[in-house]
């Protein structure tokens, strides 16, 4: 350690309130540790240190363990937001944070994935007890598992907000549609959504879901690849009412569906009248 740094460490440890500011951005972790031991350090000084993203984890951990700051909300939030804060310290400081601050942490791409997943789990557990108005607001901003949890709610406004959430992805929606527990009205909202119902993987999932209106399923068929239509026709999870229309679409493309799986071809022949009635239902 150079003498100059040793001098700064000594000076930081004994600095008075007017002098502390000159050491808050010191590049040396040892100087910052000395500053943390200074009893003249104020809340605002500690907050500046907590926000520094160029400090090693052990310095931030020392700050997190200091009981002087354990009840200071801005410092706890800053430590939780700092990607350099060690996981245990970050989680400890995240405990008790406000709902929307937790939502921000869960969606921050700057924070470690394991930390975000744990925050998501905390938020998901809280969802059932959150007031309806807060759920509607959260639905516009949250991501991942929290978004999926909100889409289980029996509230049209929440579902609408979730579907317009910029963090909603095809993968999440596919997972939701594929769950048997997903509410029928939620599936119908997705099937009628002008954006999401045009996504290819979402359409495949919707065709397999028994709550998707038949007319919407039939609307999707012309844009599906033949190989996917054949896979759908051979998938036992596809609703029975959809099969005749899948069969018809495949025949119109010159395909011969696997009779061995589903019996005689005539089983799926439908008259024009039946076709109109079935789709209209």
Image (tube, rainbow, N blue to C red):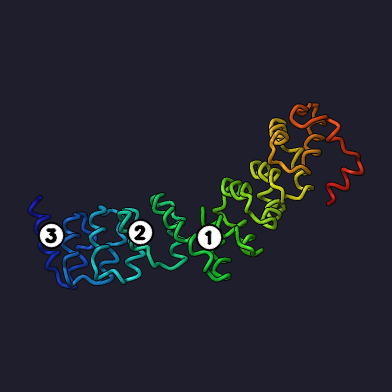
Mark 2 vs 1: CB contact within 8 A = no
Q: Earlier in the sequence, mark 1 or mark 3?
A: 3
Label 2 or label 1, whichever comes before in sequence order: 2
Query: How far is the residue under mark 1 from the one under mark 3?
Result: 44 Å
Q: Position of residue 245 (x, y in %)?
A: 80, 39
Q: Nearer the viewer, residue 67 or 105?
A: 67
- Rounded to the nearest whole Å, what is the CA distance between mark 2 and mark 1? 21 Å
Residue shown at 74% from the left, 42% from the top: 220
Q: Are marks 2 and 3 in contact (CB under 8 Å)?
A: no
Q: Write down the residue under mark 2.
A: 91
Q: Is residue 214 above or below residue 267?
A: below
Q: Residue furthest left?
A: 3
Q: Quadrant of residue 225?
A: top right
Location of residue 38 (image quadrant): bottom left
Indicate which disc residue 141 carries. Answer: 1
State the image coordinates of residue 187 (x, y, percent, origin top left).
Answer: 68, 53
Can you identify the residue that label 3 sits on?
A: 8
Q: Residues within 10 Å of mark 2 (few under 14, many from 20)?
A: some
Q: Nearer the viewer, residue 43 or 138?
A: 138
């Amino acid at each position: 350690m150079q003498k100059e740094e040793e001098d700064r460490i000594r000076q930081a440890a004994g600095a008075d309130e007017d002098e502390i500011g000159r050491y808050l951005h010191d590049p040396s972790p040892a100087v910052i540790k000395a500053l943390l031991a200074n009893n003249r350090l104020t809340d605002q000084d500690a907050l500046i240190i907590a926000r520094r993203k160029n400090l090693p984890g052990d310095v931030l951990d020392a700050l997190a363990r200091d009981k002087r700051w354990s009840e200071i909300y801005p410092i706890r939030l800053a430590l939780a937001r700092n990607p350099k804060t060690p996981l245990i310290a970050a989680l400890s400081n995240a405990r008790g944070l406000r709902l929307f601050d937790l939502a921000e942490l869960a969606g921050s791409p700057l924070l470690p994935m394991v930390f975000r997943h744990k925050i998501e789990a905390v938020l998901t557990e809280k969802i059932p007890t959150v007031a309806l108005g807060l759920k509607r607001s959260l639905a516009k901003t949250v991501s991942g598992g929290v978004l999926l949890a909100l889409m289980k709610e029996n509230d049209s406004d929440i579902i609408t907000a979730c579907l317009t959430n910029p963090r909603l992805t095809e993968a999440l929606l596919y997972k939701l549609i594929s769950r048997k527990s997903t509410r029928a009205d939620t599936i119908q909202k997705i099937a009628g959504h002008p954006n999401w119902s045009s996504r290819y993987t979402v359409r495949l999932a919707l065709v397999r879901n028994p709550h998707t209106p038949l007319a919407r399923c039939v609307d999707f068929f012309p844009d599906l690849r033949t190989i996917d239509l054949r896979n759908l026709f051979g998938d036992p999870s596809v609703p029975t009412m959809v099969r005749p229309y899948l069969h018809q679409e495949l025949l119109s493309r010159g395909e011969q569906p696997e009779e061995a799986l589903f019996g005689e071809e005539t089983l799926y022949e439908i008259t024009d009248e039946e076709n109109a009635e079935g789709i209209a239902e």
